[in-house]
Amino acid sequence: MSTILRRLPPSEATGLRTGARHSLSEVYRPADLVVLGLGVIIGAGIFSIAGEQAHTMAGPGVILSFMIAGIACLLACLCYAELSSTMPTSGSAYTFTYVIFGEVWAWIIGWALILELQFAAAVVARAWASIAVKAVADFGVRVPQRVDDVLVLVILVLLTGIVALGARVGLRALWIMVSAKLLAIGAVIVVGLTHIDVANYGDFYVEPEALPVRPQTVIEVFAGHGMAFGWFGVFAAASAIAFAYIGFDIVATSAEESVNAPKSVPKGMIRSLVIATVIYLAVALVMVGMVSYTKISGDAPLSSAFRAVGVDWMVHVIDAGAVLGLTTVILVLIVGQTRVLFSMARDGLIPRGLATVSRKYHTPSRVTLVIGCIAIVLAEFVPVLTMQELVVIGTLFAFLFVAAGVIVMRRRMPHLERGFRVPLSPLLPALSLVATLWLMLNLRLLTWAWFVLWMAFGLLVYLLYGRRNSLLATPRDTPAEHGRGRHRR
């Protein structure tokens, strides 16, 4: 038991032994980290989720749902900010857990992050292809059947290549696409504001009603039935909306490549999440204000709202914003997944050859290509769109350990230098734990079942491979030798 609970010393996590802080080039400045966060947080969902949740679950109260979800995610973001300022490493929650709770828990979190990021890349690529086809069809162009399969392959090959060529190449592309995406969103907000009818907001409350379907989430099972609207609907919608904010945690995986990481990474995460929250709230206000929630179309709600007020040309702006939004999400997901697997390989928990850094491009190009190939296989041959909640549960599981990690690390390692501290600790980290658990209980039982199976399989992989090949399990002579060993890999 002591071997699987061995903990990575903080000094080793930040590179004094491994040379980790010098394995990847520093390319991200504070503004770049904000763009990185906005690139992954704001996707196509900004054009649909407000309308979907207003129509089916919360009514005009969906605006309150956005506020609640934003607060819940901000609590988790603050916890990530403290740990990433203390341990600025590409492993993010995986490395935090390795230092605080031990190796087996680190593996479990790493395995959950693999589920989150790898499935997310495949899910978003499949959604990107569908939206791209719709965007072309909205111009009246007939699109051949099965062309979306080709588009999935094209976008994943293209973005995997960009990430493999170097962080600077990906960063330039990201700046251009995020800027264009924000222009499209700005147009939606400005034009939409001129067509708002205040009467559509009502009093932000709709009388609750029972749903005529079998309970599917953990909360619904305990309640005996599902409910829509009322305060239950507002909080249930907040759980769904919180998924749209997820992605700020990926900024933490860029820590090794960030200038003055202990200060810049926390600021990048918090600023990107706050900006995204304001943008989401603005779009929600426009969406609900333009048409009554009872008349919102479940299919492309924002586009249908603009058509309802006679502004048909905005449909093309929304299509362009959605395509760009998902493109940046895929790009950042591949970057994040690359850095997590790079860290796990560097620690020996997966084959160390994946931690090789290309001498030409100064990136972990080998593991990037592996990730891209797996994403292509998943997107092309697995019905990933029906399994997208697995992405969410993997993310929230990591949130739990990060929140708990702040509390435990304050007690065990109070001497460590922190570039950022969660205010009112341990109260806010405890509230983050509660909020995250609430979000997880609003996931389907089927999702929980698949997650348990995935984690059980991962634990078996660790016991058969990771435990024996861990760098902490190998004889160590001097810190310098181990640093050189890492560079040879």
Image (spheres, rainbow, N blue to C red):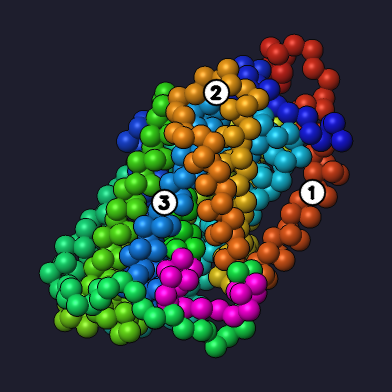
The part of the chain drawn in magenta is 220-237
Label 3 vs 2, first from the N-terminus:
2
Query: Viewer-proximal residue, 64 or 319?
Result: 64
Number of the label disc, if any, that sits on residue 71: 3
Query: Viewer-proximal residue, 332 or 76?
Result: 76
| Residue 5 is at least partly visible in this image | yes
Provide the residue designation for mark 2: 21
In the image, is residue 405 part of the stretch drawn in magenta?
A: no
Query: Viewer-proximal residue, 162 or 135?
Result: 135
**Residue 146 vertical position relative to residue 235 in the rendered view, above or below:** below
Locate the N terminus by quadrant.
Answer: top right
Return the x and y of residue 148 as percentages of the image width and height: 48, 72
Q: Amino acid at mark 1?
A: Leu
Q: Residues within 10 Å of mark 3 (few under 14, many from 20)?
A: some
Q: In the current view of this chain or complex, which residue is farthest to the bottom?
A: 212
Q: Secondary structure at mark 1?
A: helix
Provide the residue designation for mark 1: 459
**Residue 486, quarter of the rendered image:** top right
Q: Secondary structure at mark 3?
A: helix
Give the distance between the C-alpha atoms of the residues marked 1 and 3, in whole angstroms: 33 Å
Locate the C terminus by quadrant.
Answer: top right
Give the distance between the C-alpha atoms of the residues marked 3 and 2, in whole angstroms: 32 Å
Residue at 67%, 29% (x, y): give it. Answer: 99
Label 1 vs 2, first from the N-terminus:
2
In the image, is residue 231 part of the stretch drawn in magenta?
A: yes
